Amino acid sequence: MKLLYQTHSPYARKTLVFAHEVGIADQLEVIHQETSPTAKNIEVFAQNPLGKVPVLLRPHSSAIFDSDVICAYFDTLHDGPRLIPETGEARWRVLRLQAAAQGISDAGIAVRWEVERRPAELRYPALRDGYIEKLMTSYDWLEQEIDERDSMHVGQIAVATALSWIAFRGLPDFRRGHPRLAGWFDAFEARAPMKATLLSGETHD
Ligand SMILES: N[C@@H](CCC(=O)N[C@@H](CS)C(=O)NCC(=O)O)C(=O)O
């Protein structure tokens, strides 16, 4: 399988960390692709009408996106404990955590548009502040929600890869005032799948 990837994407990294955690990373050829809504990548658009990575290319089946769906697919390819609980309240708690992590990355990207990507004369400070507020309320929520006693699941992977990217891009600090979250994150970041997938590179708009 080929994974259309980006070395500085929290979403793409989520799928690759997941693959490492369930032991199938060696089945993937990881191909870096630069993407931006202002710089069309034809190869990515050919597989995903949204022009975004990650995209999973399977030899005899259709391409799969986005990162949530790729992780769900990967969870069918191994014999170990499922990282996405199939039933019960645990399923909704894990998927909700993943949704929060997705929203953190989405909000972080929106902040970056307003502070550096968009031409200065087109920036809108109220929008920047609104998205920063979403980050801060999400950090507060995670401080209560994250549970270091949980066994591995996709929600943890999503939160760790989102927060790692937040730190990588110098977005508002999640550590200050959130000792429980910071402690959990530090332990998660020390895991081999996180170390094997370090973020690097710049966005090209
Ligand atoms: N919901 C998608 C988000 C993917 C996404 O936004 N990827 C970014 C890279 S970090 C991208 O390719 N952006 C290009 C664009 O917005 O045109 C997922 O979880 O995979």
Image (cartoon, rainbow, N blue to C red):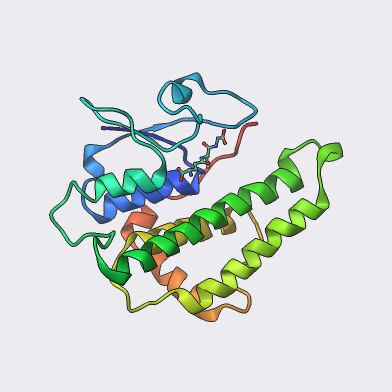
> Does residue 205 lie above or below 42 as drawn?
below
Instruction: Tell me which residue sits at (35%, 59%) in the image.
Output: 154
Extreme residue toward the right, this view:
121
Q: Is residue 115 left or right of residue 174?
A: right
Q: Position of residue 13 (x, y in %)?
A: 42, 47
> In the image, is residue 98 above or below residue 74?
below
Tell me the residue at 46%/75% (across/down): 145
Q: What is the x, y in percent for residue 19?
A: 28, 48
Q: Please report the residue visible at 29 percent of the width from the left and 28 percent of the height from the top.
A: 62
Q: Is residue 172 left or right of residue 90?
A: right
Q: Where is residue 100 shown, x and y percent of the image?
A: 50, 61
**Nearer the observer, 107 or 31:** 107
Viewer-proximal residue among 129 and 191: 129
Q: Residue at x 57, y 23 (%)?
A: 40
The answer to whether residue 197 is visible is no
Q: Quadrant of the N terminus?
A: top left
Q: Residue furthest left?
A: 79
Give the x, y percent position of residue 57. Answer: 31, 30
Q: Where is the C terminus found, in terms of image quarters?
A: top right
Q: Is residue 139 visible in this depiction of the protein? A: yes
The quadrant in which residue 64 appears is: top left
Q: How many numbered marks appear?
A: 0
Q: Where is 159 relative to 77, above or below? A: below
Residue 106 versus residue 148 in the image, above or below: above
